[in-house]
Image: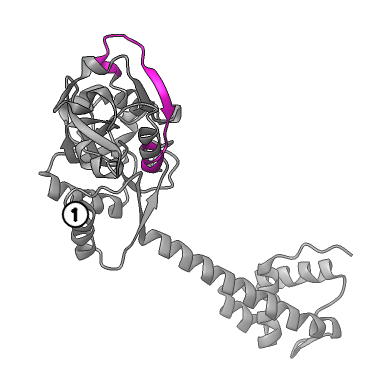
Amino acid sequence: MVMDVHGRDLRYFTAVAEELHFTRAAERLYVSQPALSKQIRMLEKQVGAALFERDRRDVRLTEVGEALLPHARRMVAEWEAARETLAKLVADRAAALVVGMSTSPGRGGVLPAIRSRFTAEHPDTRLRVRQVSWDDSTAGLADGASDVAFVWLPLPEQERYRWVPVAEEPRLVAMAETHPLADREAVDFVDLLNEPFLALPESAGPLRDYWLATEARGGQPTVIGAEVASAEETYEALAAELGVVLIALGNAPLVTLGGVVTRPVRGVSPSRFVLAWRADDRRPLVHAYARAAEALSGGNRTPPTSRPRAAARSRGTSSGTKR
């Protein structure tokens, strides 16, 4: 015998078995008595036997009903426990915010300052920091793994996002201390055109081109010495003299760990570091976190109607996470 019994059927059966009265059970379940009787008859049809003996005065469990009752009670209790667990999980997720980043914002305590402002307004919200590989230049925003994220501009499909500036910093060039250009106080970008560069993975999209400074190359192709997807990989590649790399001023300490130096670069634009979120995300916690970042940045935020390039120009903001 194959039965496809719904949890509702077992809940109805348990109520009648405990009340031994259809009207009282219906009131307890907030359903009509005819609807309850119909469901019990359907359950009995599925079981293949009567569950209750009924007459004008009494309702009694049959032997089959007595056998079913402890199992039904256990299954109903387990389902109620499952519902409570799921409800708590949903509530916890609603009161949590995932902050994505590829490297720490650092920069004079930006992250603690934003956290402090945000938690003052939302003390019961849990903040979770999520470290994301440089493969994903949106730091988890694109696939929804992060609710807000510290990222570099430009973003892929920038119209999908809004942001507030966190920092704007000059780009430096990092190289092995044995490099011929390491003795200079500053380097003209034109002198780097033929140098092999360390590149972000191709999945980083327009950010890969940005850190290769393709806009300043006048159409000259870039020589790629190696691909790197973390600060650790960047340092190792620099120390191994596989190439040079542009980095934001605030990230220089991540790679100057011994055997590597940085120099100012003339002829490239500054880097722009922002806190971003998805443009269609209307959740209050997301915008509260953005307001906390905005308060520290001077109040500039992406105009909702900005087009990608216009938005990038109108907001010269940023500083370093990736490079």
Q: Which residue matches tag 1?
A: 109
Q: Provide residue 126's location: percent of width, then percent of height.
A: 34, 63
Q: Is residue 74 above or below residue 320?
A: below
| Residue at image location 57% in from the left, 74% down from the top | 81
Quadrant holding the N terminus: bottom right
On whether residue 84 falls in the magenta region, the answer is no
Q: Is residue 232 shown left or right of residue 36? A: left
136 or 298: nearer the eye? Answer: 136
Q: Amino acid at mark 1?
A: Gly
Q: Is residue 318 shown left or right of residue 39? A: left
- Which residue range is magenta in the image? 214-234
What is the quadrant of residue 235 in the picture? top left
Q: Residue furthest left?
A: 298
Q: Residue furthest top?
A: 219
| Residue at image location 39% in from the left, 48% down from the top | 146
317 or 271: nearer the eye? Answer: 271
Q: Residue furthest right?
A: 1
What is the quadrant of residue 71 in the picture? bottom right
Q: Provide residue 282's location: percent of width, then percent of height.
A: 31, 46
Coloring basis for residues? one colour
Please tell me whether mark 1 sits on a helix, a strand or a loop.
loop
